[in-house]
Image (cartoon, rainbow, N blue to C red):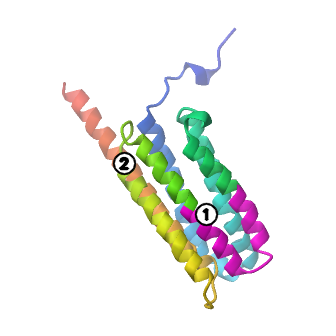
Amino acid sequence: MASHPIENRAPSSPSSWLRSYYFTRFAFSALWVAAAFTLAQHAPALAALMLVAYPAWDAIANYVDARRSGGIARNKSQMLNFVVSVATAIAVAVALGLSNNAVLQVFGVWAALAGLFQLVTAVRRWSSCGAQWAMILSGAQSILAGGFMLKMAAGTEPVGIANIAPYAAFGAFYFLVSALWLTVSEARRASKRAAI
């Protein structure tokens, strides 16, 4: 019986997978931020859809990464991130019917928890994969951003998707830094192997 073509391919290295994963997450976040500052400002329905889609995408991304990195059972911090992100997408959908402040509160709690889980994941990967210093910084900054969003949500100033976009922008930046760092590291290793 013929085997599936995918089964015949050599598995990619952890760093190769992470490089592609980080580039993909950067691209999504960058597009989301661009739309948040432009199209969504004049289209409430689009803004609402984007606010639900952001944590939903994070859930999918964490699930896929955990599956590609040894399985859900071996990546408990990402499993928790997946669960929290799914719950957040649902909570945002509910909060949209209440107020923008309620939405920002949900995002604040999510940013803090997701940042904590991301930090734990990065620390666990430190010995096996490069570029984790950027993910650690990103996780720590996400925790701080969560607190800042909760503070804004409790205030009297009008809030909206533009108050969440900077958080997503910093996330995009850290994913790009990690992807580029892994790209350079892999190129250096390839160069050393070729020189031997």
Marker disc for residue 131: 2
The location of residue 189, given as percent across then percent down, is 28, 35
Q: CA distance from mark 2 to mark 1?
A: 24 Å
Look at the numbered discs 2 and 1 and tell me whether their residues touch, using CB distance below 8 Å.
no
User: Is disc 2 placed on a helix, strand or loop?
Assistant: loop
Residue 111 falls within the magenta-colored stretch? yes
Q: Which quarter of the image is occupied by the C terminus?
A: top left
Please state the horizontal and vertical placement of residue 160, each as a whole percent of the image.
64, 80
Give the residue drawn at x 59%, y 70%: 108
- When the figure is inspected, residue 121 is found, relative to residue 140, above or below; the finding is above
Q: Amino acid at mark 2?
A: Ala
> Which x, y percent locates residue 70?
54, 32
The magenta-colored residue range is 87-112
Q: Quadrant of residue 92?
A: bottom right
Residue most extreme to the top: 1
| Residue identifier under label 1 | 110
